[in-house]
Image: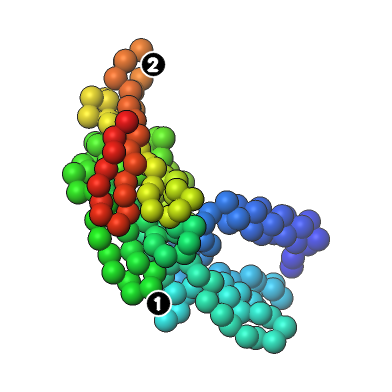
């Protein structure tokens, strides 16, 4: 039997999750610890039934109205695609691929590399603490809702011809090995690797500002 207190707690958890989703560029994959899920159920009638409005199908994300059941695409990248940052004119989107930045034409799907020399310890477009599996934030909570990493740290020029980003240099930063006794997705304990400079090391991550021309791929480094 569900008490009023239990229901209030469940409603608060749902409200907290909705507030957290608003901080992401697209809805997080529902049920981060469930493999192969397609919908985010909202349980009712004591768990006998559920409803949902966000779901993945036909290579994209869709949103359906509960009043007339009409569905329309949300404009978010298809499941499995990396998060993107779209230009002001809506012509091109930039995403991370490995340790480099790539551009994608939104009209014909053409893709091209903006950088080609990124490495695990010297990547482009990461956040201030790294966002890859070997970066300074390899254990970022974003891995829990199913996101591989944050969107690339880029800022578009108003005319949509260039992006400003930075390249993080962690080549001299000490590598540490925290122990995940209870991995998020289950299994045996894991020992992830990440870059983390203890206080006083003097070899923390450095950042180099880079302006990239989206059409021809030329770079101007600060």
Q: For mark 1, what is the residue?
A: 59
Q: Position of residue 114 (x, y in %)?
A: 26, 52
Residue extending farthest left: 117
Q: CA distance from mark 1 to mark 2?
A: 46 Å
Q: How dense is the environment of label 1, judged by Cα within 10 Å: few (below 14), some, or many (20 and up)? A: few
Return the mark for residue 199: 2
The local secondary structure at tag 1 comes to loop
Query: What residue is drawn where x is 69% and y is 87%?
Result: 68
**Left or right of 5 on screen, residue 192:** left
Residue 219 visible in the current orientation: yes
Q: How dense is the environment of label 2, judged by Cα within 10 Å: few (below 14), some, or many (20 and up)? A: few
Where 105 falls versus 161 (above or below)? below
Where 131 falls versus 55 (above or below)? above
Where 152 falls versus 210 (above or below)? below
Q: Position of residue 143 (x, y in %)?
A: 41, 51
Q: Position of residue 220 (x, y in %)?
A: 29, 38
**Left or right of 46 on screen, residue 214:** left
Query: What residue is drawn where x is 52% and y is 76%?
Result: 73
Q: Nearer the viewer, mark 1 or mark 2?
A: 1
Q: Position of residue 71 (x, y in %)?
A: 58, 82
**Left or right of 195 on screen, residue 51:** right
Along the line of sight, which residue is nearer the eye, 104 or 216?
Answer: 216
**Left or right of 53 on screen, residue 193:** left
Badge 1 or badge 2: first in the primary sequence: 1
- State yes or no: discs 1 and 2 in contact (Cβ < 8 Å): no
Along the line of sight, which residue is nearer the eye, 37 or 218?
Answer: 218
Quadrant where the C terminus is found in the figure = top left
Along the line of sight, which residue is nearer the eye, 179 or 169?
Answer: 169
Residue 178 visible in the current orientation: no
């Amino acid at each position: 039997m569900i008490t009023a207190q239990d229901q209030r707690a469940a409603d608060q958890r749902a409200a907290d999750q909705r507030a957290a989703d608003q901080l992401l560029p697209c809805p997080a994959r529902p049920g981060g610890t469930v493999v192969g899920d397609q919908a985010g159920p909202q349980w009712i009638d004591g768990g006998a039934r559920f409803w949902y409005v966000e779901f993945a199908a036909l290579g994209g994300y869709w949103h359906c109205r509960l009043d007339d059941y009409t569905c329309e695409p949300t404009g978010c990248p298809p499941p499995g695609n990396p998060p993107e940052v779209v230009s002001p004119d809506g012509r091109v989107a930039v995403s991370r691929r490995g340790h480099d930045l790539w551009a994608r034409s939104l009209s014909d799907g053409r893709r091209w590399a903006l950088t080609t020399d990124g490495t695990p310890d010297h990547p482009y477009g990461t956040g201030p603490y790294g966002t890859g599996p070997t970066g300074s934030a390899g254990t970022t909570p974003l891995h829990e809702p199913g996101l591989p990493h944050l969107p690339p740290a880029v800022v578009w020029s108003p005319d949509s011809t260039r992006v400003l980003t930075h390249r993080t240099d962690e080549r001299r930063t000490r590598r540490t090995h925290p122990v995940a006794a209870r991995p998020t997705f289950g299994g045996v304990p894991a020992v992830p690797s990440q870059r983390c400079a203890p206080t006083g090391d003097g070899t923390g991550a450095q950042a180099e500002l880079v302006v990239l021309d989206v059409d021809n791929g030329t770079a101007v480094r600060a």
